[in-house]
């Protein structure tokens, strides 16, 4: 089944992509939730025209995302956490904690666009996260988890 995505779907595609999915997934999940629509020939023509019109606007958005990405690379974020023996954390650090640290620095980024390599963090030390600012702009963001000062 061919569908046109109306919004980004994780592990499937981005808004306005034409994707092939199994019939049940499209019919029972994507279409009823309003996330996708059938890719009929007329819908594809409308999509092509819309993409052509959005192309020049997209350049500005990509430029802004690239500029934000460069600003993020300059940041030195240190997230403090309670630490026990052998630098092991009490609890864990997740993408939500990284998003909060970035918000304190003035960069509002939704946590769903932040992916920490290896999942949640359980030990202090340097780490890296991928931040997706746009479908074409993904930034490798280094940060550090440090012990909380008593």
Image (cartoon, rainbow, N blue to C red):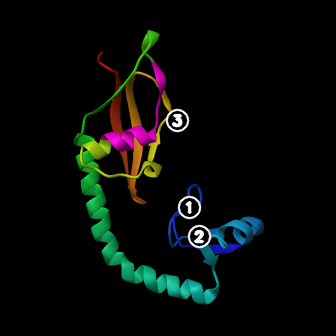
In this figure, which residue is indicated by the disc labeled 1? Answer: 9
Q: Residue 53: x, y in percent?
A: 38, 83
Classify the position of the N terminus by image quarter: bottom right
Check the image and report above or below for 55 versus 67: below
Magenta highlight on residue 97: yes
Q: Provide the residue designation for mark 3.
A: 119
- Upstream in sequence: badge 1 or badge 2: 1
CB under 8 Å between discs 1 and 2: yes
First in sequence: mark 3 vs mark 1: 1
Coordinates of residue 130 in the picture (x, y in percent): 42, 44
Which one is in front, 102 or 42?
A: 102
Q: Which residue is mark 2?
A: 35
Answer yes or no: is residue 21 visible. Answer: no
> 11 or 81: nearer the eye?
81
Within 10 Å of disc 1 (Cα), the crowding (few <14, some 14-19, many 20+) is few
Left or right of 147, for residue 33: right
**Residue 110 shows in this picture:** yes
Give the residue at x 58% y 55%: 11
């Amino acid at each position: 089944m061919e569908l046109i995505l109306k919004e980004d779907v994780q592990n499937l595609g981005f808004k306005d992509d034409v994707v092939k999915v199994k019939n049940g997934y499209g019919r029972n999940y994507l279409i009823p939730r309003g996330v996708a629509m059938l890719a009929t020939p007329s819908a594809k023509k409308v999509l092509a025209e819309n993409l052509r019109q959005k192309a020049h606007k997209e350049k500005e958005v990509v430029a802004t995302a690239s500029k934000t990405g460069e600003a993020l690379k300059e940041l030195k974020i240190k997230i403090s956490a309670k630490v026990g023996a052998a630098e092991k954390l009490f609890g864990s650090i997740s993408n939500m904690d990284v998003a909060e640290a970035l918000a304190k620095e003035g960069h509002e980024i939704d946590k769903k666009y932040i992916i920490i390599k290896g999942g949640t963090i359980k030990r202090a030390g340097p780490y890296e996260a991928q931040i997706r600012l746009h479908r074409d702009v993904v930034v490798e963001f280094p940060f550090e988890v440090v012990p909380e000062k008593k």
